[in-house]
Image (cartoon, grey):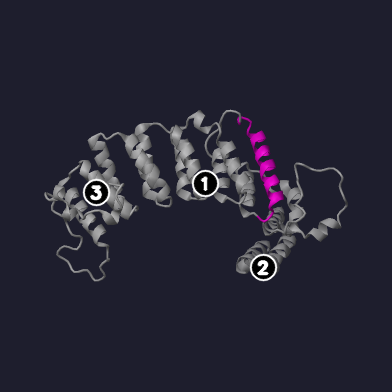
Amino acid sequence: MASLALEDQLLFADRPEWADVVPLHQYEGVTPLAPIFYTPAYKDATNYFRGIVKTGEKSARVLDLTENIIRQNPAHYSAWQYRYKTLMSLNTPLDVELQLIDELSIKYLKTYQVWHHRRLLVQQTKQPGPELEFIANALQIDTKNYHTWSYRQWILAHFNDDKLWSRELEFVESMLNNDLRNNSAWHHRFFVVFQSGVRKGNEDRDETVRRELTFVKSKIAIAPNNASAWNYLRGVLDHSKMPYSNLEFFVAPYSVPHSAQQDAPSVDAIDLENPLPSPGAQLPCVAAIEFMADIYESNGRNDLMKATELWKSLAHEHDTMRKKYWEYRIKEALLNVR
């Protein structure tokens, strides 16, 4: 049916092979206050869909009908559910269905139902291997699509096969090299490293934390105003229960203008553990100022005024969009002192 454009197909009411089905109209016997004006083709298909659901029919023509509806409305979860039940009832070869879903997954990337249906199919086939390549190709179309990334995490976690995990860090690193502001890729990296168990080669968790801190600091040095990298940095510290003050030496240069750094004593040696901002970076960095303020706040009373001064600079100069929030932080901090 997919070979013929939807607008060129006969209505189901005009097809002899559907003459035995009694269509059920959505508004039969009622007069709605604000009826939805569906297209004639969609109204026709869904009328017949309600008819076959009532009788419980599961047949090849039901697969044609549900595909027709899905192509008109890919978010029609009832059509997807009934289609899956029909596939199971008919014992239909799922490789054929997956070929169709390959097309629909790309065409309707942002539709949850298509990815859920794909998940149900792969649970039946128990063949997750090809899925990672398919997902990687889908991410080339939309690198930040939530449903695609969520499906990738499900594949990895559900089957939990070392072969599936073996190159995942390499994959996510390539995604970040293409776009280091890709928040979805940063989230996936945290999932792989910290939220999916301990994989072979990462048994030394202290070394893993050091590796991740080195990695994220190198990315911050390239693009200091990348909020995704700063969030990842905080995530690593929070997960490993490390105090933010451990990174004060790294963060401080990002919280002041370039002119302040030029006044500092020159250092010949390059500190790879604490890379400095790139020469063209826009400084001071809002995330770094906030980070330094959090360090001073955690130090307690003696450094609290330093924190409030930084929050004031955010409220009145560097991050005025969130002025009310920074004023709230100042107020709460001062209340805790009394």
Secondary element under disc 1, as helix, strand or loop, is helix
Secondary element under disc 2, as helix, strand or loop, is helix
Measured as percent of width and height from the top left, residue 169 is found at 58, 37
Q: Is residue 277 left or right of residue 22?
A: right
Which range of residues does the magenta coloring cover?
202-225
Give the Cα separation between the discs numbered 3 and 1. Answer: 31 Å
Which mark lies nearer to you, 2 or 1? 1
Reading the image, the residue beneath label 1 is: 140
Amino acid residing under circle 2: Ala
The answer to which image quadrant residue 115 occupies is top left
Measured as percent of width and height from the top left, residue 105 is found at 40, 46
- Is any part of residue 149 visible from this angle? no
Label 2 Cα crowd, 10 Å radius (few <14 / some 14-19 / many 20+): some
Q: In this view, does 196 lie to the left or right of 68?
A: right
Give the Cα separation between the discs numbered 2 and 1. Answer: 38 Å
Instruction: Determine the residue positioned at 69% across, 64% down.
Output: 311
Quadrant location of the C terminus? Answer: bottom right
The answer to which image quadrant residue 225 occupies is bottom right
- Is any part of residue 188 visible from this angle? yes
